[in-house]
Image (cartoon, rainbow, N blue to C red):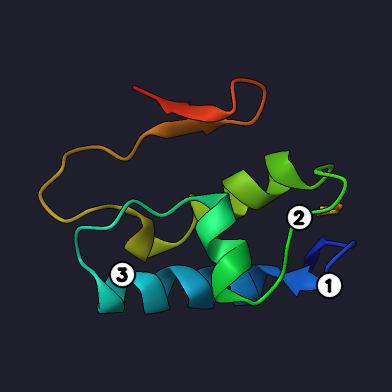
Amino acid sequence: MIICHCQSITDHDIRAAVDWMRASDPQTLITPGKIYRALGKRADCGGCMPLFLSTMQTAPGLRVPGAGEPPILRPSLGRAIR
Ligand code: FES
């Protein structure tokens, strides 16, 4: 399913990027910006952020091992909150 229409990013692309980043660095915090960069793209309108964030949260690799519960990502705040 297409998540970001501006950049033609699918839910599969997002989950694959999360998995790749987690495999590359188990301690890294994964953000939407890092996913765009990993895919060689840049966000444009930002209209996809709510769906982009919820798709990220379905990726098992989003969580930093041993760091407790993953943060709740809210696009309106522009940052992760606990
Ligand atoms: S739909 Fe993703 S940046 Fe526009």
Distance from the alpha carbon under mark 1 to that under mark 2 = 11 Å
Q: Residues within 10 Å of mark 2 (few under 14, many from 20)?
A: some
Distance from the alpha carbon under mark 1 to that under mark 3 = 23 Å
The circle drawn on residue 8 is: 1
Q: Amino acid at mark 3?
A: Arg
Q: Of helix, strand and loop, which one carries label 2?
A: loop
The answer to which of 71 and 43 lies nearer the viewer is 43
The answer to which of 3 and 34 lies nearer the viewer is 34
**42 relative to 38, above or below:** above
Q: Earlier in the sequence, mark 1 or mark 3?
A: 1
Q: Which residue is mark 3?
A: 22
- Residue 9 is left or right of residue 35, and the answer is right
The circle drawn on residue 43 is: 2
Label 2 beta carbon less than 8 Å to ligand 1? yes
Distance from the alpha carbon under mark 2 to that under mark 3 = 21 Å
Q: Position of residue 70 (x, y in %)?
A: 32, 40
What residue sits 19% from the left and 58% below the top?
27
What residue sits 44% from the left and 68% below the top?
18
Residue 72: image quadrant is top left
- Residue 17 is left or right of residue 13, and the answer is left
**Tag in front: 2 or 3:** 2
Q: Position of residue 57 (x, y in %)?
A: 48, 49
Q: Of helix, strand and loop, which one carries label 3?
A: helix
Q: Position of residue 17 (x, y in %)?
A: 50, 74
